[in-house]
Image (tube, rainbow, N blue to C red):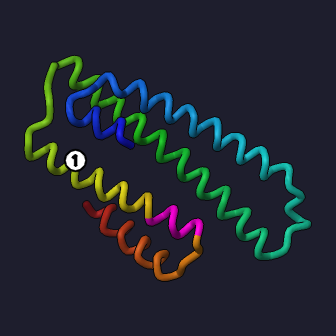
Amino acid sequence: MEGLNKVMHGEPRQEKELRKLADDINVLYTAIKLYLARMPKEELAEEESRRWAEIIEMSLNLEQASDIVERMGSEIADKSLAARRAFSLDGLKELDALYEQLLSNLKLAMSVFFSGDVTSARRFASQQTSFSHS
């Protein structure tokens, strides 16, 4: 995520790092998916089956998020390199606020995923709603 922040702040060459990170995440997603596909799902207990589905969903969401961040970084880098432009101060402040909210949501999502804490899950759901309206 730091690579996207650097691209937003005028370091378009960091886009290569974003691409590498997205590639690494794709490799991990594929490995997780293949590992879970080998599990005999019908032999899993109900709780294990639920967790299996949660792991698949979380890994897919992370893979999709990395693709979005990579695409955003690429578009920002291409436009700023082509036109030799930077964001206005107000534009950067807005992007920084969205970036910080995205990081906060990611941390909360990971906390919910690992702990299964219902209170955190509700907080995450409400933050997701506010983020999508930003």
For the point 53% across and 81% down, the residue is 118
Quadrant showing the N terminus:
top left
Q: Quadrant of residue 107?
A: bottom left
| Above or below: residue 132 compared with residue 75 | below
Within the magenta stretch, is there residue 51? no
Residue holding disc 1: 95
Total tally of numbered discs in the picture: 1
What crowding class fits label 1: few (fewer than 14 Cα within 10 Å), some (14-19), or many (20 or more)?
some
| Region in magenta | 108-114
Q: Residue at x 33, y 38 (%)?
A: 4
Say which element carries label 1: helix
- Furthest residue to the left? 89
Give coordinates of residue 31: x percent, y percent. Answer: 72, 41
Q: Main secondary structure of the magenta part?
A: helix
Q: Would residue 94 appear left or right of 69 to someone viewing this image? A: left
Location of residue 43 in the rendering, given as x and y in whole percent from the top left corner:
91, 66
- Check residue 109 for magenta coloring: yes
